[in-house]
């Protein structure tokens, strides 16, 4: 039987110590009125070889494809060293580093991770990660409200250019705490949040403005103007970022005059495979003054009894305290394994590699858009963008379906994501990363051209 | 003593780069307006590929892990994380699937998820399962939110109180507050069962339900669960089950059959997915028929042999979406593979051997003179010893024992939880440990107890053989140093 | 239980009050500081803040726990102990003296009568520590 080492002799010796009991005796405190489990829907077990054959069959149901979908999960090359190292048992099967002396590997790694993320975002503090980008945004909203305790204001301005799934998740998590998420419409010409309509919303006060960068459409919001506008209204700025973009683009700590207050986002582009949506990792940073309101684990540097440098989980008392205050969080974990992948990835790429990856992705997207223009498929939005863009393809859903069968996932059809905007019917969100070659781009266009009628 | 490992930043040399990992760009033309661009490169380490590998390899050697050490952490179920499971979950076909890819291209993965839902429902005695919560705490949130939604849907807005035993895990009150509820604590008696008299007094028209785990956090089976279930249900409330200790009853009895209406599971505990130094976990939620409409989306349904993910439009009463995509998908896949490897017989043997190991350990430690918290009760998959006698006699407590155990090559058991038992160690061996390992652990505990008597300072200043000695966590909190600054 | 000075007044949530002219000095008790352990951080209200009786107005944080401090009476904050920014451990070393938290202008004298006497507080602590 898999993974249980006991031999009959072991079992006999152990039951001898238990004065001749048997397996059924071990469960004699369970009332007999509770029916015993039968597990009729569990098939018989398999050894590793048979399991591998079974999984190969299942994997074969996945055709080979070229992927041009982004929308919050981005396909980048992952250096072989990343998962080789992450797969070491000492990283993969370690527990949460509560016994700090026995976990210096994980703790130091997280400290290095925190250092890298603050460097990228130009913020003061980073935590050790949260579950994913969407829940990180929910936690950022709760944090913003906790931090604004004086004005007791529970209104958050949420542009509709924030990822639809992020907005849904935030709503599911915060709505039972009396927090109002005020959605701000976007401008159909630019693809950016509509600043005219936004300014009309300041009739009442609000605790925070969420600014995505890039936004869901790949477009770049006017981060400086929006940051200053929010601060002028005594509100906090929550930045939602793609950390890969920050290899090239302006860090939230530099937005406007004072910079963003809280930064969150999705770390998946850093060394995590697409893998059907997870596991990924959410990031969160903040200004120094807000550190005691930040949820999640944080690693701090200290010394041991002999003055040697060491690392521990710190500010843990906050976790209980945060729970007792009005805007409550119950989070108590981090995505340790994925943080390990992200840290190794960033170490291997360095600032040059990150910039080159971001730039090549962007240039590839531009190249594809240029080719598409030649066959009369054009961008829908006028604002500047980064490595992702919305184009209009007639009969988009049908075209996407047919090309998927030929092994090309042309992008994300937006029709079902913005039901309030019929103009987005037939719009497709396309993302090209550094993983695509010129041949790939030509093949994309040829396939589309074949479908155009 | 191990040499200190420098920070990755301390290897950094300006201009150094892992060239093989840097994409080739034809030119440096950016074509994005200047006001959106970074002016100064981020302060990230610049190292070669070999340096990075040496550094992280070096860091890994400074960790305890299941692969290297016995980890009897109570309530954490530190069982072997099968390598084969990990490898198969990382097949390239699964890794390259985009979460928003057309479902025609991901039927293999969706099939595994659908079957996992069904198998987990069977294991737990429930009928509906959603796999998307990404950790136990999120699964707990989902379960309590579903209870709140159920009452609201019935038009009953008075039910704002959640009952919680005083021995419960700290996330329980936090979760209740997140769902707009208040918590009423119910005391535990000296045999480890919930105080039924106090429970009866606490139940009323404002009772939304009760949050329990069984076996409880005290490591014993809550024997009165049929009576408790009846009391709560008769009063119109629902029962929520915290699945942290599911390993103890796997294949024996099912929470659904005990009267629970909704529960979460911890795949990183019971179903052997890797702990990864703090995560990722997965906390799927399961429920009976009456709570099915409220399950968080997405989950997988099947029609005419095709698998698809459902949305809020399909189930408008759902409590909503809890993650960007469908949760920790790769972890879910690992749980599926693990259950398929074990199969029906393998699952049943888990609780048998986990319980045998715990009872054996408990009996031998008791014989060796350690004080059990509940000497008259059977151990489930875990049990508690209290070191309050040693604390009084020798001045060493659970923390000191724990630190000294590290020197003997064992990760310490869970300390100081549950709060009800002073100077406690909550010990859970799991089924994947051999008698030989358990015997070595017992020898170590006896040796340390002897040291406590004759050389208590050895414990108080432990650990001695690890990369660092005992760390100053007061200083860490007072003088915050949370990132490297050159 | 630690020391419980007779001339002070107390709250059930372990704050102490010393009346001086028309204002009161507030801190946490010796018992409270032993439960918390060495403090690493103290968050104080701002001078000028108007606080109601029972409102949480400060936080004392140790490695083990972060606890709210509840204001014992209505009033306006006139001074806070700025030494605690660098030396939060003053609260542990001298909870009734140099470890004071803040000074508050007394709004309603009657509220002082509602507070526990030293004897009453000692009784409560003895019961809690059972």
Image (tube, coloured by chain):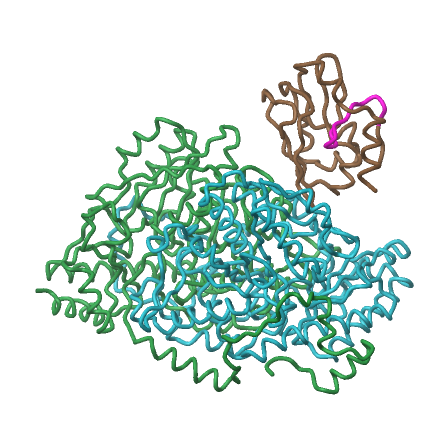
> Looking at the figure, which quarter contains the N terminus of chain C?
top right
Residue C7 belongs to the span the image colors magenta:
yes
Residue at the image position 87 percent from the left and 65 percent from the top? B451
Question: Toward the viewer: A422 or A146?
Answer: A422
Quick one: which chain is cyan? B
Look at chain C in the picture and name its colour.
Answer: brown
Label tally: 0
Quick one: which chain is green? A
Residue at the image position 59 percent from the left and 53 percent from the top? A299
Magenta region, main secondary structure:
loop
Question: Toward the viewer: B153 or C58?
Answer: B153
Residue at the image position 68 percent from the left and 15 percent from the top? C106
> Looking at the figure, which quarter contains the C terminus of chain C?
top right
Image coords of residue A284 (percent x, y): 48, 49
Residue B231 lies, with reference to residue A369, above or below; the image says above
Image coords of residue B98 (percent x, y): 34, 65
* Residue B198 seen in the current view: yes
Range shown magenta: C5-15
The answer to whether residue B97 is left or right of residue B394 is left
């Amino acid at each position: 039987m898999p993974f249980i080492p006991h031999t009959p002799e072991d079992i006999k010796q152990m039951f001898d110590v238990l004065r001749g009991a048997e397996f059924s005796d071990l469960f004699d405190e369970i009332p007999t009125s509770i029916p015993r489990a039968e597990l009729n829907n569990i098939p018989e077990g398999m050894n590793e070889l048979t399991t591998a054959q079974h999984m190969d069959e299942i994997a074969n149901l996945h055709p080979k494809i070229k992927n041009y979908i982004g929308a919050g999960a981005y396909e980048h090359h992952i250096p072989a060293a990343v998962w080789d190292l992450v797969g070491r048992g000492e990283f993969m099967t370690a527990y949460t580093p509560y016994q700090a002396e026995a976990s210096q590997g994980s703790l130091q790694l997280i400290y290095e991770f925190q250092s890298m993320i603050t460097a990228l975002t130009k913020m003061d503090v980073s935590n050790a990660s949260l579950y994913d980008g969407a829940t990180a945004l929910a936690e950022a909203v709760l944090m913003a409200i906790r931090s604004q305790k004086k004005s007791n204001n529970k209104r958050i301005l949420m542009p509709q250019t924030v990822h639809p799934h992020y907005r849904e998740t935030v709503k599911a998590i915060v709505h039972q705490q009396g927090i109002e998420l005020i959605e701000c419409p976007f401008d159909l010409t630019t693809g950016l949040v509509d600043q005219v309509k936004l300014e009309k919303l300041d009739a009442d006060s609000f605790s925070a403005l969420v600014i995505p960068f890039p936004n869901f459409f790949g477009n770049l919001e006017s981060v400086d103007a929006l940051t200053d506008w929010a601060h002028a209204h005594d509100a906090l700025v929550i930045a939602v970022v793609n950390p890969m973009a920050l290899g090239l683009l302006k860090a939230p700590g530099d937005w406007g005059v004072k910079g963003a207050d809280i930064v969150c986002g999705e770390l998946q582009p850093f060394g995590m495979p697409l893998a059907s949506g997870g596991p990924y990792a959410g990031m969160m940073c903040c200004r120094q003054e807000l550190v005691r309101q930040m949820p999640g684990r944080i690693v701090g540097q200290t010394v041991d009894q002999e003055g040697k440098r060491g690392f521990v989980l710190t500010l843990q008392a906050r976790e209980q305290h945060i729970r007792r205050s009005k805007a409550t969080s119950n989070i108590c974990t981090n995505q340790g394994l994925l943080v390990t992948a992200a840290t190794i990835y960033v170490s291997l790429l360095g600032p040059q590699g990150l910039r080159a990856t971001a730039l090549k992705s962007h240039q590839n997207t531009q190249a594809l858009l240029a080719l598409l223009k030649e066959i009369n498929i054009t961008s829908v939005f006028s604002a500047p963008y980064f490595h992702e863009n919305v184009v209009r393809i007639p009969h988009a859903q049908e075209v996407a379906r047919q090309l998927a069968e030929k092994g090309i996932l042309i992008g994300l059809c937006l029709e079902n994501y913005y039901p309030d905007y019929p103009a987005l019917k037939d719009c497709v969100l396309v993302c090209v990363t550094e993983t695509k070659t010129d041949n790939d781009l030509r093949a994309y266009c040829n396939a589309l051209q074949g479908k155009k009628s | 003593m191990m040499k200190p490992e420098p920070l990755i930043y301390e290897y950094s040399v300006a201009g150094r780069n892992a060239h093989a990992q840097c994409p080739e760009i034809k030119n440096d033309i950016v074509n994005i307006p200047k006001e959106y661009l970074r002016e100064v490169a981020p302060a990230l380490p610049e190292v070669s590929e070999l340096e990075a590998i040496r550094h992280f390899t070096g860091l890994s050697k400074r960790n305890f892990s299941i692969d290297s050490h016995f980890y009897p952490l109570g309530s954490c179920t530190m069982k072997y994380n099968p390598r084969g499971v990990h490898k198969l979950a990382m097949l390239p076909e699964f890794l390259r699937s985009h979460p928003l890819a057309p479902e025609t291209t991901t039927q293999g993965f969706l099939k595994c998820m659908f079957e996992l839902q069904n198998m987990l429902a069977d294991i737990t005695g429930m009928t509906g399962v959603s796999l998307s919560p990404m950790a136990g705490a999120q699964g707990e949130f989902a379960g309590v939110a579903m209870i709140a939604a159920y009452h609201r849907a019935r038009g009953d807005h008075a039910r704002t109180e959640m009952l919680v035993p005083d021995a419960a895990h700290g996330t329980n009150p936090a979760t209740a507050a997140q769902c707009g509820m208040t918590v009423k604590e119910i005391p535990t008696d000296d045999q480890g069962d919930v105080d039924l008299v106090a429970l009866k007094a606490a139940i009323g028209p404002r009772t939304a339900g009760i949050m329990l785990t069984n076996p409880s956090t005290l490591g014993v089976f809550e024997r009165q669960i049929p009576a408790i279930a009846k009391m709560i249900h008769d009063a119109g409330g629902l029962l929520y089950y915290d699945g942290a200790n599911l390993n103890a009853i796997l294949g024996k009895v099912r929470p659904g059959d005990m009267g629970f209406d909704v529960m979460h599971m911890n795949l990183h505990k019971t179903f052997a997915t890797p702990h990864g130094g703090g995560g990722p976990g997965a906390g799927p939620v399961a429920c009976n028929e009456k709570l099915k409409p409220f399950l968080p989306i997405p989950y997988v349904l099947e029609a005419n042999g095709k698998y698809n993910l459902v949305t809020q439009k399909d189930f408008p009463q759902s409590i909503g979406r809890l993650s960007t995509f469908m949760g920790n998908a790769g972890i879910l896949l690992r749980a599926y593979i693990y259950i398929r490897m074990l199969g029906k017989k393998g699952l049943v043997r888990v609780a048998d051997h986990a319980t045998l190991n715990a009872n054996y350990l408990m009996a031998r430690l008791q014989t060796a003179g350690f004080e059990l918290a509940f000497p008259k009760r059977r151990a489930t998959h875990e049990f508690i010893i209290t070191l309050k006698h040693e604390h009084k006699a020798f001045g060493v407590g659970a923390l000191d024992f724990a630190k000294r155990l590290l020197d003997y090559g064992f990760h310490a058991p869970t300390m100081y939880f549950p709060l009800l038992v002073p100077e406690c160690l909550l010990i859970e061996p799991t089924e994947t440990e051999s008698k030989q390992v358990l015997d070595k652990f017992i020898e170590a505990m006896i040796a340390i107890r002897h040291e406590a008597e004759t050389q208590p300072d050895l414990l108080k200043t432990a650990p001695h053989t690890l990369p660092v000695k005992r760390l100053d966590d007061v200083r860490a909190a007072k003088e915050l140093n949370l990132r490297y600054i050159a | 239980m630690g020391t419980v000075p007779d001339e002070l007044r107390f709250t059930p949530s372990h704050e102490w009050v010393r009346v001086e002219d028309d204002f009161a000095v507030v801190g946490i008790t010796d018992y409270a500081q032993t439960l918390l352990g060495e403090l690493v951080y103290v968050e104080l209200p701002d001078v000028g803040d108007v606080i109601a009786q029972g409102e949480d107005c400060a936080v004392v944080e140790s490695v083990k726990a972060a606890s709210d401090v509840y204001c014992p009476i209505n009033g306006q904050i006139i001074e806070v102990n700025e030494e605690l920014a660098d030396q939060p451990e003053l609260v542990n070393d001298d909870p009734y003296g140099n470890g004071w938290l803040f000074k508050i202008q007394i709004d309603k004298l009657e509220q002082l009568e509602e507070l526990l006497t030293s004897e009453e507080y000692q009784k409560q602590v003895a019961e809690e520590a059972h």
